[in-house]
Image (cartoon, rainbow, N blue to C red):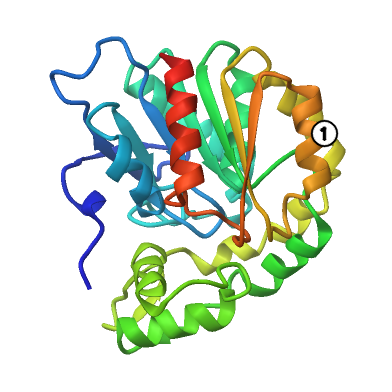
C-alpha cells in the first residue's frame, strides 16, 4: 500500500518537556511563494493518535500554509512519560506551549481532533490572542458518556498483527460502526496512520498503552467545566466538525456551541462517527473556508 504523501516533505524537529522528555514534531514548511504573514497550522491529535493523523490536512494545505504536527508525549516518535499521571490535557498544554515558544510563534491556527480540540481550547484560554483560528474536530464542551465508556473499554488494549492487511481487518472489526462505508483500502490507509512496526517486527498501535491509566479519572470530570474554556474561542475564526454518527459530540451540543459562539461555522459529516479523518469533502471544503477567514 502506498504511504500518505505526508510521510515525506517535512523537516523533523524536537523539543524537551519540563520533565525531561524528548518530544518530536513534523514541520511542513510553506513554499517560498506562499502569501507572507500567515500563521502556521498547529495540528493537535486525539487520545491514541499521532502526527500522521493529519495527513489529509498536510496533503491539501501544506505548502500554501506551514503545518506543524507534533506527537504528544507517549505517542508516535515522542518519548513515553516516566510518570503516567502526566498523560492529561493540562500537561499537553504545557508541552505545546514550550514548543510554541521554542519556535518563536506568536499566533497559530489550532486544529484539534477530539482530545486535541480540548487542548486547543485550553491553549486559547491560557494565552489569549494566540489562536488566529481554530478547528474542533468532533469534540465540544460536553462529552457524551456513551462515547467515553466506549473509549475507556478500548484504550490501552493493544494487539499485534503479522501484516498490514491483518491490522486493517482488525481495525475494521473494532471501528466499523464509525466508518460504515469504508473499503479495505480505507482501513489500510487508516491503519498506517494509527499503527507502526514494533520492535518485535509485528504491527502495533503507535502509543503508550499506559495512557489508559489516568483516562477514567479525566473522563469523570464535569463536562460543564469546559463551556467557559470553549468561550475562549470568542472572536477567533473557528469551525466545529461533527461526524453524524458520533457518540462523543451530540447534535444538541453542536447546536449549543453554535448558539454560544455565533461566529463559529458548524459542519456535520454524514455517515461518519468519531472521528472524521478530515479527508471527507465537506470537511476539506469547510477547512478551506476557515483558512480564508484567517487570511
Does residue 18 appear in the picture of this structure? no
Nearest the eye: 259 or 97: 259
Judge from the rendering whether residue 102 lies leftward or rightward of residue 264; answer left or right.
left
- Crowding around mark 1 (Cα neighbors within 10 Å: few <14, some 14 to 19, many 20+) is some
Nearest the eye: 73 or 278: 278
Nearest the eye: 66 or 278: 278
User: Where's residue 196, x and y in %?
Assistant: 33, 70
Identify the secondary structure beneath mark 1.
helix
Q: Quadrant of residue 201?
A: bottom left
The residue shown at (46%, 16%) is: 294
User: Where's residue 210, x and y in %?
Assistant: 56, 65
Query: Quick check: 142 above or below 77?
Result: above
User: Where's residue 122, x and y in %?
Assistant: 64, 29
Residue that carries the numbered disc 1 in the rendered image:
256
Query: Quick check: 18 above or below 158?
Result: above
Does residue 267 appear in the picture of this structure? yes
Judge from the rendering whether residue 95 lies leftward or rightward of residue 115; answer left or right.
left
Which quadrant would the C terminus be assigned to in this image? top left
Amino acid at each position: 500500500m502506498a504511504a500518505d504523501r505526508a510521510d515525506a516533505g517535512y523537516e523533523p524537529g524536537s523539543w524537551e518537556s519540563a520533565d525531561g522528555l524528548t518530544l518530536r514534531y513534523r514541520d511542513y514548511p510553506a513554499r517560498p511563494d506562499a502569501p507572507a504573514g500567515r500563521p502556521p497550522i498547529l495540528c493537535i491529535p486525539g487520545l491514541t493518535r499521532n502526527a500522521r493523523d493529519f495527513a489529509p490536512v498536510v496533503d491539501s494545505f501544506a505548502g500554501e500554509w506551514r503545518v506543524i504536527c507534533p506527537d504528544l508525549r507517549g505517542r508516535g516518535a515522542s518519548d513515553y512519560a516516566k510518570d503516567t499521571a502526566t498523560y492529561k490535557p493540562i500537561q499537553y498544554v504545557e508541552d505545546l506551549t514550550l514548543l510554541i515558544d521554542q519556535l518563536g510563534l506568536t499566533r497559530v491556527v489550532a486544529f484539534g481532533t477530539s482530545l486535541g480540540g480540548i487542548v486547543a481550547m485550553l491553549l486559547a484560554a491560557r494565552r489569549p490572542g494566540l489562536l488566529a483560528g481554530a478547528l474542533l474536530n468532533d469534540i465540544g464542551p460536553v462529552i457524551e458518556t456513551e462515547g467515553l465508556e466506549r473509549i475507556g473499554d478500548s484504550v490501552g488494549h493493544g494487539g499485534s498483527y503479522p501484516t498490514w492487511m491483518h491490522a486493517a481487518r482488525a481495525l475494521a472489526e473494532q471501528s466499523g460502526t464509525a466508518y460504515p462505508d469504508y473499503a479495505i483500502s480505507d482501513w489500510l490507509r487508516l491503519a498506517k496512520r494509527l499503527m507502526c512496526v514494533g520492535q518485535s517486527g509485528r504491527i502495533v498501535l503507535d502509543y503508550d498503552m499506559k495512557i489508559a491509566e489516568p483516562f477514567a479519572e479525566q473522563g469523570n470530570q464535569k463536562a460543564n467545566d469546559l463551556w467557559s474554556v470553549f468561550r475562549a474561542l470568542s472572536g477567533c475564526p473557528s469551525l466545529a466538525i461533527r461526524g453524524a454518527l458520533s457518540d462523543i459530540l451530540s447534535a444538541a451540543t453542536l447546536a449549543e456551541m453554535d448558539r454560544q459562539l455565533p461566529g463559529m461555522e458548524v459542519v456535520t459529516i454524514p455517515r461518519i462517527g468519531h472521528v472524521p479523518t478530515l479527508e471527507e469533502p465537506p470537511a476539506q471544503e469547510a477547512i478551506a473556508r476557515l483558512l480564508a477567514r484567517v487570511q
